[in-house]
Image (spheres, rainbow, N blue to C red):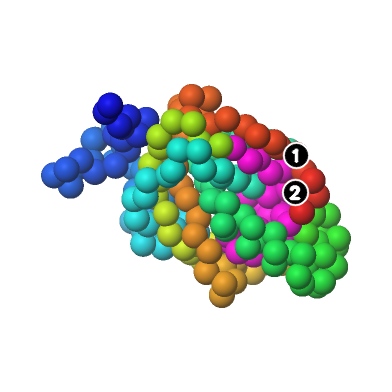
Amino acid sequence: MAIEAPLNIDCFPNDQGRFDPRYAVDDKKARDYFEEASGRKYANAGIFNPRRGHLPVGGHFFRFCDSRSKSLDGGWWVNEETFLRVRAFARRHGHIADFSRTVAVSPLAYAAKLHLAVPFEWGDCDHVVEARLVRRLDAYAGYGNVAFLADDDRRRDPRDGGAKYIPVQQKLAQLFIPDMKLHFRAAMKVMREGPGSMFG
């Protein structure tokens, strides 16, 4: 019996190392790589040195969403090991719970922000989805990079304190799954979703 190809196979280089031209941007998305009109090029958060990985069918994956948008089908996810380590960190360190109250999020959400480098201006990470992979998908995997805040003060969130986000030294892998919006319903079975406090 033939093994099913990943649903998002066209988002990665082929056997000759060439991208399908329609999806040549996905490597840049994984790195959160930007090029400004001025010609300046830089990476903002994303994954440092992303590598292609095969996600195991039957595995459980977690996504930290903004509690207002609740965008379940976004591309950024973590595997179960990373989720459990973030949760253990939130439970183990009392100062995480103390500070999370001052910024109005759950301790789990705040711990996720510290590990995955997600500023408040991008979302609060306080809505969590757990999903089981039911059809094959591939992902870019690696450690998080530094996240910089917007230059435009109108886009900033005061809870960020004007500082860049550097992932904590406990290196945890994160995933960028290209074309997730296209394949979410076919590839993922949502097991549960809700506020971070429900998972913490």
Q: Residue 103: percent from the left, percent from the top?
A: 81, 59
Quadrant housing residue 131: top right
Magenta range: 108-131
Q: Residue at the spot x=70%, y=64% of the render? A: 88
Q: Is residue 177 left or right of residue 172?
A: left
Q: Which residue is mark 1?
A: 194
- Quadrant where the image shows the N terminus: top left
Report how many numbered discs are placed on residues in the image: 2
Q: Residue 112: percent from the left, percent from the top?
A: 65, 58
- Asked whether 148 or 107 is in front, the reply is 107
Amino acid on which the number 1 mark rests in the picture:
Gly
Q: Secondary structure at mark 1?
A: strand
Q: Marks 1 and 2: which is nearer the front?
A: 2
Is residue 71 visible in the rendered image? The answer is: no
Q: Residue furthest front?
A: 1
Amino acid on which the number 2 mark rests in the picture:
Phe
Residue 105: in magenta span = no
Q: Residue at the spot x=79%, y=46% of the render? A: 198
